[in-house]
Image (tube, helix red, strand yellow):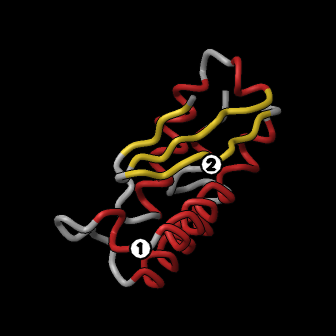
Amino acid sequence: MVDVSEIEFGDGPGGERSRAEASSVAEAVGTTEVEAGTPAGGLDNDALRERVEEALDTIRPAIAMDGGNVELLDIEDGVVTLRMMGACGGCPMSTMTLKRGIEERLRSMVPGIQRVDAI
C-alpha cells in the first residue's frame, strides 16, 4: 500500500512542491475550473495526455517505493484509464491507492478529469 499522506497536498515532505506544481499546471491551463460542456477543461488530446502524465510523475515515486508503477492507457470524456503494474497489480490495497492517491491528484492538477479507472 502506498502511504498517501506523503503524496497528498499538505504537510508532508512533498506537500509544498505538490501545491506549487498544481498551481503551475492550473496557471498554464488558465483555469482551475472546468467550463460546463467543455470536455477535459478545453485541452486537446495531446495537451491533456501531457498534463495527466505530468501529474502521474508526481505520484510515481511513492508508488515505486512499494514496487509498483502506473501506466496511462486512455483518456476519454474525463475518464482516465490506467494499468497498475508491478506490486500494485495484485495488491489488495491498489484500489485505495487508485482512488485516494492517484484520482485525487489527477483531479486536482488536471481540469476536466472526472474519474480514474484501472484495468
Tell me if residue 72 comes above or below residue 19 in the rendering.
Answer: above
> What residue is disc 1 on?
43
62 or 45: nearer the viewer: 45
Label 2: few (<14), some (14–19) or many (≥20) C-alpha neighbours in 10 Å: some
Tell me if residue 84 comes above or below residue 24 in the rendering.
Answer: above
Corner quadrant of residue 17: bottom right
User: Which mark is on residue 72?
Assistant: 2
User: Which mark is on residue 77?
Assistant: none
Measured from the top left, where is residue 117 in percent x and y? 48, 35
Corner quadrant of residue 94: top right
From the viewer's perspective, tell me whether residue 59 is left or right of residue 48. right
13 or 49: nearer the viewer: 49
Report the residue that reaches farthest toward the left: 36
Discs 1, 2 touching: Cβ within 8 Å: no
Residue occupying image coordinates x 57% and y 33%? 97
Measured from the top left, where is residue 26 in percent x and y? 43, 76
Tell me if residue 44 comes above or below residue 49 in the rendering.
Answer: below
Measured from the top left, where is residue 25 in percent x and y? 50, 75
Residue occupying image coordinates x 50% and y 56%? 10
Task: Report the amino acid beneath label 2.
Answer: Leu
Measured from the top left, where is residue 79 in percent x and y? 41, 46
How far apart in space, not on screen, are marks 1 and 2 (Cα)?
17 Å
The quarter of the picture where the C terminus appears is top right
Task: Report the amino acid beneath label 1.
Answer: Leu
Q: How many marks?
A: 2
